[in-house]
Amino acid sequence: MFVIGWTFWKLFVFKAPHIFRTPTTWKVLVFNFKSWSPLLALAIMMWCCIASSHAQQTGCGLGPCGEIHSGPGCVDNGCCSEVCSFSPVCCETNWDENCLFYANQTCQICGIPGLGSCFIPHMKASCADSACCGLVCAIDSFCCDSSWDTNCAWSAQEICVLPPPKSCGDPTAGDCMQPHGNSSCADSVCCQSVCAGSPSCCEVMWDDLCAFVAVQLCNSNCTLTCPAGATNESETCSQRTNDPSIRPDSVGPNTPQSIAAQATICGKIFTTNSGGNVVVDVDVYSIDLRNADTDHDGSVKVSITLAAVRPVFAALVPVNSTETALPGAQVLVNGAGCSSGRDWNCVAPAQYWIVVAPGANGIISSQTIDCANGGYWMKVETSAACALPCVNATGGCFDVHGTPSCVDPSCCSLVCAYIASCCETAWDADCAILAAKDCGAPAPVYDSCATPLDISTGSTNITLLGSTAGSPAFTCAANSAVSGGDVWLRWTTPPGTHGDYQIDVCGATFDTRMDVFTGPCSSLTLKQCSDNSVFCSPNYASRVTLAANCATPYLIRVASLTGQTGFATVHVTLISSAQTCCIEDLNQSGIVDAADLGTLLGQFGVCPNCSADFNASGFVDSSDLGQMLANFGTCP
């Protein structure tokens, strides 16, 4: 009995998890239960309880993997297995905060909080909002299989519901230095400073560009250096002697400090607590432009450059203005983080005040500032010649041109708030790239394989602004990481020749990838690829060499790294002696044979521009047949 019992015990302990998966097995065993020995029946009953408990403990549960819930496991087997390999208790009792912690570290499925906002690109697949994640991945499976790249984030912004706008200073709005899935950020002063130049950061989304600007503007640990030759503010720090009528708490005597039309000033502002009330220092400078209009066109150009440790603004307003006039100043510039901001405008030749105060966009803040971190410098420049920015411009915002400004006034203003020279000298590549990011450039007409740009041997300028990622995925062995937008070009070997060619985008100012294919878009054959070529400077541009066959069209894809874009010049250069092709080899197989003869006979007769009309007579006739037969065999 012991031997029989032990044999059955081994059978059930080691095999029963497979036996008991089917209802039929259960019925047979239960039906015959009474015929078994009592001892064996008891052993089976004991095992059933153990097996049932074991199945519950190791099986994945029904709760969401991205939320804390009662009961073991979660709905996704892969995520559940990953988490329980770190913490087995997650598949034994409850899916608690420790289980969620491990899920955030390892799982890449829709709804995991640690993956971040669906509206912000990240390297891992999927995103935190399960509903939005599902919508995006239904149209682009790459987003849930490989990486939530820029295209996935853009798709989310198009088809998912954006979160309600948050206000500057909202503690739930997110870190100003990091991109997040809602508008604004938690530091009120920093938020206002950033949104002065990019309103979309406070109206739509605090993206990577908003975070980048915040890092530049909101650093209070920087060291500000006063420019050589600057004049110091006449007011001593901790005193208030130069802010008449700006604030209702002004003290006398108050007289603006007069400055010349061309001046650089170094000063300090501060806040104090007087009787429980916060008192904010404001500095006012007086400038007289009544005699500055020497060309008598009725206006004077005024430019103000401002740098400060904490967020500070400078505003050009009429004399005797009060605080309410500052947001509508004719020239209004922000400075913070020791980085300089710049603004300019054409104004009437008159007397003005330049008000320097803590805050941004003409709104005075009560931020805590002392003499140690309240430093700023301001440079004022004027000239008689003037042309208004962002008005009557002719150049496209996404094109490089030698004239300042661009045709879209709102986009132009956004760009020039960051790069003043875009509205003063020329609209260069930096201006166009920033415009593409801020204003949304349309995709180039050669954005897809189906609509390539035909190019010739030599140099061709291209743009990737607004381009989207195509397929197939970049597979170059040097770097198979996710690519960003790409464009497609078509180059054909010059007629009657073949040889070795070099194709490159050396000189590109962004990280590029390049593929060269043959064949139709539906069945591409990769011939060459390049990521970062050591032969290019800078070496993140791409270069390939290609043994080009006769009369063969090649599709060239130029791609950027995710999140990068810009302009490039494609160079196609012959690097060997051009070899003559056999024009009689109609299918370019390298041999003039029966296949070519069949093609010729099929074109026999009147056939202008036919490939077998070797003498261009307009007829495929005996002369062409004789030429083919004379060259029958291997091509030279």
Image: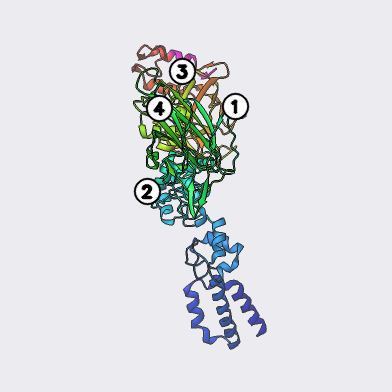
Discs 3/4, front:
4
Looking at the image, is mark 3 or mark 4 earlier in the sequence?
4
Task: Evaluate whether residue 126 shows in this view.
Answer: no
Disc 2 to disc 4, C-alpha distance: 33 Å
- Which colour style is shown? rainbow
Q: Secondary structure at mark 1?
A: loop
Query: x and y percent of residue 129 in the render?
Result: 44, 55
What residue does disc 4 label?
Answer: 405
Residue 197, how many percent across, how many down? 44, 38
Neighbour class for label 1 at 10 Å: few (<14), some, many (≥20)?
Answer: some
Residue under pointer 2: 159
Q: Are marks 3 and 2 in contact (CB under 8 Å)?
A: no
Q: Which residues are magenta?
A: 626-636
Q: Earlier in the sequence, mark 4 or mark 1?
A: 4
Residue holding disc 3: 495
Q: Label 3 is placed on what type of residue?
A: Pro
